[in-house]
Amino acid sequence: MRVLVLHSRYSSGSTSGENRVVEDEVRLLQEAGHDVTAWTPEHRPGLGGIRPAADAIWSRSAAAHVEELITRCSPDVAHVHSLYPRLSPAILRALSAAGVPTVMTLHNFRLVCLPATLLRDGRICEDCLGKVPWRGVVHRCYRDSLAGSTALATSIALHRAARTFRETTLFAAVSDFVRRKLVQGGLDAARIRVRNNFAWPSPPREGPGETFVFAGRLSPEKGLDLLVESWSSRFPLVVVGDGPERERLTSAARSGVKFVGTVNPAQIPSVLRQARALVVPSQCYEGSPRVIVEALAAGVPVIASDLGGLPEHVLHGSSGLLVPARDRDAWGAAVESLEDDSESMRLGEGAVRSWEADFSPPVSLRGLESLYAEAIRASDS
């Protein structure tokens, strides 16, 4: 199968989970023998300038380049990931005009929320859900930029009015929670499928683990303050990542909490292999955190908040534990239960089984091929 992959690459490079998902899917398809052409121009920071703003609204140059790629590689199907800011929804119209069946992955909430997170000021916000996102402009929700927020809101509003998103054959949401929110936001439920992210095989954890691990951005919505301010386990909490909250969290942390900063994504499996559990105390809507799938692949249980798409990735009592967000006592009890070696081992075995069944490369490849085949059939009918 000839596949054209299109993605507006984030400037954070390999630390971006979405960038890595795209890279891994390209590799997965190529190793299976598919002919893949990928165009992933890098994100230019900021939409404040006239040219970046215009490109986000309707990039004629991106649409023209996609037309050239179609002529050059004659794809059977196109797979679109991030549209903003380098590609814009204009490429969806170019693909449709050329008769190319198109699948678009919904990694987040971008089509209904300017920052793509359904968050404002560190709290869940659904003010723009099902509406034109002008409130996001008022609050400067895109990177605290009035110009950037205006450009993005204009693009979303314009292409909704022009029915551009209806040019996409099928959408693939990374969790059913993401699917439901996008349907509330106005996307056609009949054209959205749910398809999990995947992780490559990982050397298995040996024994019950020696640390608890947090890996992610150090920002308020991630809820890490709840753990670092009350950590009392006899096992250390290793915090991997950086962000605006690092200084405050470091100052507030109790003994037993170790901040190691950002690490190369290739090193995450080795960090996880030492883990008794991965902790994900988010107080925001997560779609499909890549680090959870990587933990499952390594046989590491996950303790996670019961918000967003997390309950679809962590099977309570089987591959990990789900805890009410911000419930300090419940989090303490969950951490304490994983201090038991036999419980850690039992949930670790369940984690591997969950990865094999739902998040492994063979499962992901079958899902991709099935999705592409359905899009081609729908386009031919």
Image: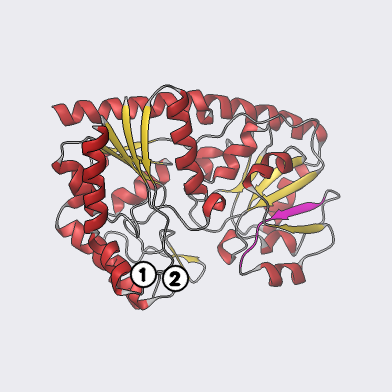
| Residue 129 belongs to magenta span | no
Q: Is residue 168 left or right of residue 233?
A: left
Query: Where is residue 141 drawn, in percent x and y?
Result: 40, 71
- State the residue position of label 1: 47
The reply to whether residue 274 is in sight is: yes
Task: Name the amino acid, label 1.
Answer: Leu
For numbered disc 1, what is the local secondary structure?
loop
Q: Is residue 53 above or below residue 99?
A: below
Magenta segment? 236-243
- Residue drawn at x 42%, y 65% as measured from the top left: 125
Query: Where is residue 40 drawn, in percent x and y?
Result: 39, 48
- Between 114 and 70, the residue placed more toward the observer is 70
The reply to whether residue 133 is in sight is: no
Q: Are marks 2 and 1 in contact (CB under 8 Å)?
A: yes
Q: Is residue 348 left or right of residue 208?
A: left
- State the residue position of label 2: 143
Quadrant including the C terminus: top left
For numbered disc 2, what is the local secondary structure?
loop
Q: Is residue 308 above or below residue 143?
A: above
